[in-house]
Image: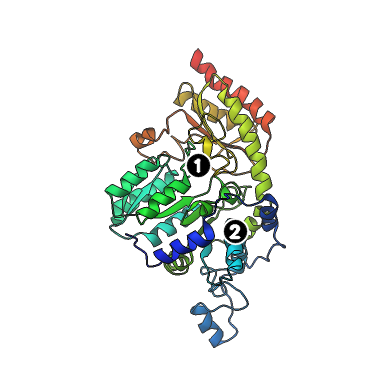
């Protein structure tokens, strides 16, 4: 049974305005929204003056003027005009089809709310704290190491159950929800971090809805350009803006889109009290960088496809996990759910841990084109070792069960170009493998 008062309202709105057969927005329209009509000024201030006592009182009850976001002209912890601009752009990138359909129906009631926070983890933690109560449960897939840690903390300290399942197998989600009627949220990444399994979001949405659970999709690995989860049935979409939206590793940020009653009540109140506030400068930088989002991502994906195919042919590599390869178990979702194979590659090195460490040390050198770093989505290519870095906090038994072995390597492909990265890997793999065969 649904646990939120707006459940029926939201299901109706999803059906009428959000879920559509066409999974992607047209390139030209997407790019034009990204570019916008010019960047806002940076409102680098904590406090905003009121026109008078009545103006201050009105703003504290959420009354706004001239299309301003409620509360965005009181105190930057509650909102800021620079951040408000970014929230509108990101909202349109995910929901322009909803706007079009609502306008056609002369619908004036808001459906989806948008809020930018200080980081991707701020977006995830605020969302879950606003959704879950003691005694509830959450079903999750193979997720980022800090998300994994957060779920364990919610269980240990706040009595919120969690179950990790293989979200690439919808029947496992169905079974878990059936066995645990207190599960109110399904949380997934698709593609998953770090080994790029993919959930069928449309099918998972149908299952979650049938059980009265809300589907939260972390879209960080894709951004709105590669994948638009609302079109597929998601209830809430979160992402780390630090990755593809920023694309230059110059700032951090997080974003949440969800049902308007939730975003303006439970979520806003939680964010107000927790204070995960982005700086105006970070919001401005992300507004600047989003202008080139589709061009950057397309170029990185093109290189990633070539590099994945090349790595798959190498003797030093046991297997490559990349959705764009025909051998990937969910390759059929490319084109149906995700626009391309993406720009992140995972692969297993022959020999396991020691060759992986040698490969990391090779790319840590200043004369190689990639950086040994744990982020992704940048114009710079990054390589990292999940078992000892991003997922080192996951218990070893759980980590191995999820396929995060000691020899697994994750690459975020940037804009250096295929030949540059290939030539570096020729040398790097040779160095990693040389010690193995001696």
Q: Are marks 1 and 2 in contact (CB under 8 Å)?
A: no
User: Mark 1, mark 2: which one is toward the viewer?
Assistant: 2
Q: Residue at x 65, y 36 (%)?
A: 302
Q: Residue at x 49, y 37 (%)?
A: 196
Q: Which residue is mark 1?
A: 191
Picture quadrant of residue 267: bottom left
Q: Residue at x 56, y 84 (%)?
A: 55
Give residue 410's position: percent from left, percent from top: 52, 35
Q: Nearer the viewer, residue 194 or 385?
A: 194
Is tag 1's residue or tag 2's residue first in the polypeptide sequence?
Answer: 2
Q: Which residue is mark 2?
A: 97
Label 1: which secondary element: loop
Q: Nearer the viewer, residue 169 or 436?
A: 169
**Residue 150, numbered circle:** none
Q: Nearer the viewer, residue 358 or 425?
A: 425
Q: Is 296 drawn above or below residue 119 in the view shown? A: above
């Amino acid at each position: 049974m649904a646990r939120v008062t707006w459940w029926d309202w939201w299901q109706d709105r999803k059906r009428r305005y959000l879920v559509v057969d066409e999974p992607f927005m047209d390139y030209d329209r997407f790019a034009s929204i990204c570019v916008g009509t010019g960047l806002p000024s940076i409102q680098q201030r904590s406090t905003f003056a009121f026109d008078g006592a009545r103006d201050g009182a009105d703003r504290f009850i959420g009354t706004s003027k001239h299309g301003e976001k409620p509360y965005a002209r009181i105190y930057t912890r509650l909102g800021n005009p620079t951040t408000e601009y970014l929230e509108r752009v990101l909202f349109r990138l995910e929901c322009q089809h909803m706007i079009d359909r609502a306008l056609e129906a002369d619908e004036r009631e808001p459906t989806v709310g948008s809020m930018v926070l200080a980081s991707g983890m701020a977006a995830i933690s605020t969302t879950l704290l606003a959704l879950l109560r003691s005694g509830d449960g959450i079903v999750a897939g193979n997720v980022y190491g800090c998300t994994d840690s957060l779920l364990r903390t919610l269980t240990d300290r706040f009595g919120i159950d969690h179950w990790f399942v293989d979200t690439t197998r919808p029947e496992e989600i169905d079974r878990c929800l059936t066995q645990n009627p207190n599960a109110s949220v399904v949380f997934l990444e698709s593609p998953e971090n770090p080994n790029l399994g993919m959930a069928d979001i449309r099918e998972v949405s149908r299952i979650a809805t049938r059980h009265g659970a809300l589907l939260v999709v972390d879209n960080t690995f894709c951004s709105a350009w590669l994948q638009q989860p609302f079109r597929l049935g998601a209830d809430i979409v979160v992402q780390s803006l630090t990755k593809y939206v920023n694309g230059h590793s110059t700032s951090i940020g997080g974003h949440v889109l969800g049902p308007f009653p939730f975003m303006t009540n439970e979520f806003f109140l939680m964010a107000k009290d927790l204070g995960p506030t982005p700086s105006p400068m970070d919001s401005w930088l992300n507004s600047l960088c989003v202008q080139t989002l589709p061009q950057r991502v397309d170029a990185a994906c093109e290189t990633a496809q070539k590099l994945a195919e090349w790595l798959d042919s190498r003797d030093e590599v046991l297997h490559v996990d990349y959705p764009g390869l025909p051998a990937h178990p969910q390759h059929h979702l490319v084109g149906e759910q995700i626009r391309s194979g993406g720009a992140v590659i995972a692969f297993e090195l022959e020999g396991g841990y020691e060759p992986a460490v040698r490969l990391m040390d090779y790319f840590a050198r200043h004369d190689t084109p990639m950086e040994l770093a744990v982020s992704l989505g940048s114009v710079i290519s990054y390589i990292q070792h999940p078992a000892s870095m991003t997922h080192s906090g996951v218990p070893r038994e759980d980590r191995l069960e999820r396929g995060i072995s000691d020899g697994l390597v994750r690459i975020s492909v940037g804009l250096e170009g295929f030949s540059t990265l290939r030539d570096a890997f020729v040398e790097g793999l040779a160095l990693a493998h040389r010690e193995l065969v001696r």
